[in-house]
Image: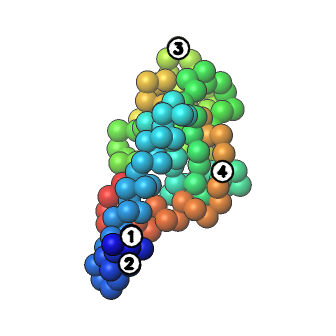
Amino acid sequence: MDIRKTWDKYTEGWFGTIVYLFLGFVIAYSVNIALGFVLQTNTPVVAVFSDSMVPTFYKGDMIVVYGDKNIAVGDIVVFDVPDRQYPIIHRVISISDSVIRTKGDNNSGPDPENWMTTKERVHGKAILKIPILGWVKIIFVGITGFT
C-alpha cells in the first residue's frame, strides 16, 4: 500500500482538518518542551498580552526566554504574580535582599507591591523578540480561555 495514498485518505475533509490541528498541537507542545530543556526554563516562549512594555515590546510579540537566574537591574524578566493566570514580562528596576521590583517600560510607575517577586518566581530573561507571532496565542486564549 502506498503511504502517500493512505495519508491523503485520512487527511481529507473535516477529519483531515482535525488530524492537522491535532498534529499542529502535538508539534507545538513538543517544540515547547524541547526549547524549555535547551533554554533551562519551564516557560521558553511567552506572548506579550499588553502594551505595558512599549516601545521595547508590543502586544502580539513573542518573546523567547532564557532561564538565567543572575538577575540585574535593567534586565527584562518573565515572572509569575499571584493574581494573574499568565506570566508578566517587565523590566527590573530594583533588587533588595530577595525582593525584585519591576516596571513596564510604558507604565508611569513601578508595578504594584503585590507584584514584587523573588528569584524563585522568575522564569528567566527575555533574549529574543519575534514580532506578531504572539497573536496566535492571544487569539487562542481569547477563543478557548486556556492559558
Name the spot of residue 146 as percent of width and height, x first.
32, 58
Q: CA distance from mark 4 to mark 1?
A: 39 Å
Closest to the camera, between mark 3 and mark 1, is 1
Label 1 CA crowd tier, 10 Å (few <14, some 14–19, many 20+)? few
Residue bearing the label numbered 3: 97
When the figure is inspected, residue 10 is found, relative to residue 61, above or below; the finding is: below
The residue where tag 1 is placed is 3
Query: Separation of disc 3 and disc 4 at Cα?
Result: 30 Å
Amino acid type at image mark 1: Ile
Against 134, is 104 above or below? Answer: above
Q: Pointer 4 and pointer 1: residues touching (CB < 8 Å)?
A: no
Can residue 84 be seen in this snapshot? yes
Q: Secondary structure at mark 4?
A: strand
Query: Which of the marked residues, 4 or 1, is nearer the chain's N terminus?
Result: 1
Direction from residue 4 to residue 144 in the image, left or right? left
User: Callout 2: few (<14), some (14-19), or many (20+) C-alpha neighbours within 10 Å?
Assistant: few
Foreground mark, 3 or 4, reads 4
